[in-house]
Structures are given as structure tokens and as C-alpha cells.
Image: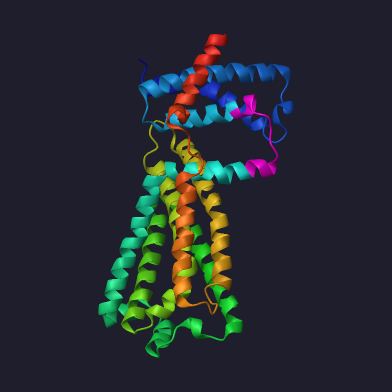
Amino acid sequence: MPSLGQFIGTRREAWTQLETLLARSEGNGLRRLSSGELETLGRGYRQLLSDLALAQRDFPTDQLTGWLEQLAARAHLRLYRAPGGAWRRLAAFFLVGFPQRFRAAWRYVLLAAALLLIPATGGYLAALSSEAAREALVPAQLREFMERGETWIDIPGALRPAMAAVLFTHNIGVSFMAFAGGVLWGLGSVYALAFNGLFLGAVMGAGQHHGVVHLLADFISPHGYIEITCIILAGAAGLMLGHALLRPGALRRRDALVLSGRRAIALVLGAMPVFVIAGIVEGNVSPSELPTEAKLAIGPLLWVALMAWVLLAGRTPRRARPGLAVSALSTRLSTRG
């Protein structure tokens, strides 16, 4: 059995050629390729399936195997599926692709959630029990509102949508920092998640201390659950980038970053519609005069719907898992040959 380095060294050129042809065929499809290039593409795909079978057998846990699986899937889609419209591809991504990416990244999602929620818990307890912590963690203007038994949401109704837009933009910025911070070996993502979790927890703890936490919950609950989940997803994507830089495996660090970057960007793009929904709810439902009970129920219901989407949509029957499907396709092609 060849070593991983030998395996990559002997096959890298063929994989690069196949990837180049796939990139050229994007947009207008296979019509951009000459007859000779089409033959090269088909031959390269069949050889790739053989290489993938070897990688799955000999190097099942290496990042290279995942990259080969992605390359094989791209080639299969290009060769054997009729091209669909842009809207159809977009719908397929949100109905199937994004939920699958979410489930594949579950370890990063759980780590990002812990990096945000554990500091949030610490910030809540500290601000609840310590005046020094409240002064250090909660801006003075917010503390002044709370000391008067008010919150910023007590401003005139005409100004609330503008304030909601400011907060929505802030949360988009937090998510961007949580994602982009991954290129700093993941440290930027860790900082963005932990700092904002600490701040959120401290604000809620200060609100509890001053007896206005019910006012904060009345406003935050409708949009907060799904908005925080989006921030966690952005942080998870950043952690994926950091992990690729820290542990590239047999790939070059640049190649590992590119591979993880594709997965991470898909995770962030999939969360964008959820962010839009959160913004609409934040601007219209959260500051409304709906009963508090209704607002407290809307947030968890939206979160349950989000979880049902990402955990259940796009599931493949156990008998047809992606790795087995590629192996079965390889067998059928070999039989035909």
C-alpha cells in the first residue's frame, strides 16, 4: 500500500486537470469543452472514482478523502444531470444542500455554541451578583436606563424600527467577525463568540438585577433565538477555517483552507435567509404591542422550525449514503467498461 504522500504525488496532476475542466464547464455547461476535453473529463472521472475507492479504504479519515468525494460529486453532476436553472439550483441548495452542510459541521456548531453560551452564562451570573461586573461589562447608558426601571425599547415608537435596524446591522457585523476571524487560526472566531456571549449575558444579568429582564425578554424573544443561532453558525464556519489552518493533514495549508472555505461559505450563505427573517421579526414583531405571552412563544416556535429544517431536510436513506453511492456508481461504470 503506498503512503499518503506517494498517493497524492502520483495522482495530483490528474486531479488538478479534472478540477480545471470542471471549472471551465461551469456556467454554460459542457458546451464550453471540445470533444477531446469531454473525453478527457469522462476518463478523468472514471479514474477519480478508482482513486476515491482507494482513499476511502486506506485513508478514510484524512481531509483528502473528503475533497475527492466533493470532486467526484461535482463531476457526476456535470456529466450525468441535466442543467437546471439558477432558481432551481438555489432551491436545491436551501432544501437539501444547506441542511446537509449543517449536519456535517455539527461538531463545529456545538463548539461555537459552547463558546458563546458558556461566557453568556458567566456574564449573566457576574452581572446579577456584582456591581463591579455590571460597571465593567454593561455600557453606562444601558445601566442608566435599567436603574430607572426602563430599557432602550421604551423610546418612542417611531424610533424603534431605526434602533432595530441598528441592532440588526450590529448582529450582521458580529456574524461577519465570527466568520472572518477564522483566518486568524480560529482565534478571531473564538474571541467574537466569547465576547458577544459575555456581553449578552451581562446585559440580561443586569436587567435581572434591576427588575427589567421581563422587558428585555419581551423584545428579544421573538427574534433572538434564530438570530443567536445564525451567529453560532457564522462562528462554526470560522472555526472550520481555523481548523484547516491548524491541522491541514496531508494537504498543503492553502489547499486545506480552500477546501474548508467552500464548506464554511456554504454554511454562512445558508444562514442568510434566516438572518433576514430575524431582521423582519426584530423590526416589526419585537417592538409591537403583542401580548408578552405571544412574543415569548414566537421565538421558540421559530427556532424549532429552523431546527426541523436543518436536521430533517435533505436526508438520504441509510442504504444510499453518499460514500456508498459513489462506490456503487464506480462499480456500475466498471461493469459497463
Of 48 and 217, the residue lying toward us: 217
Residue that sits furthest to the left in the current view: 129
User: In the image, what residue occupies the spot 49% across and 46% down?
Assistant: 264
The quadrant of the rendering that contains the C terminus is top right
Residue 85: in magenta span: yes
Would residue 178 be seen by someone viewing this image from the given angle? Answer: no
In the rendering, at what x and y percent does residue 260 appear?
47, 41
The quadrant of the rendering that contains the N terminus is top left
In the rendering, at what x and y percent does residue 33 appear?
71, 24
Residue that sits furthest to the bottom in the current view: 148
User: In the image, what residue occupies the spot 67% across and 31% down?
Assistant: 24
State the extent of the magenta-drawn residues as a range: 77-90
Residue 115: in magenta span: no
333 sits to left or right of 103: right
User: In the image, what residue occupies the spot 43% across and 77% down?
Assistant: 216
- From the viewer's perspective, is residue 156 above or below residue 218? below
Q: Main secondary structure of the magenta part?
A: helix
In the rendering, at what x and y percent does residue 319 appear?
44, 27
- From the viewer's perspective, is residue 14 above or below residue 312? above
Q: Quadrant of residue 164?
A: bottom right
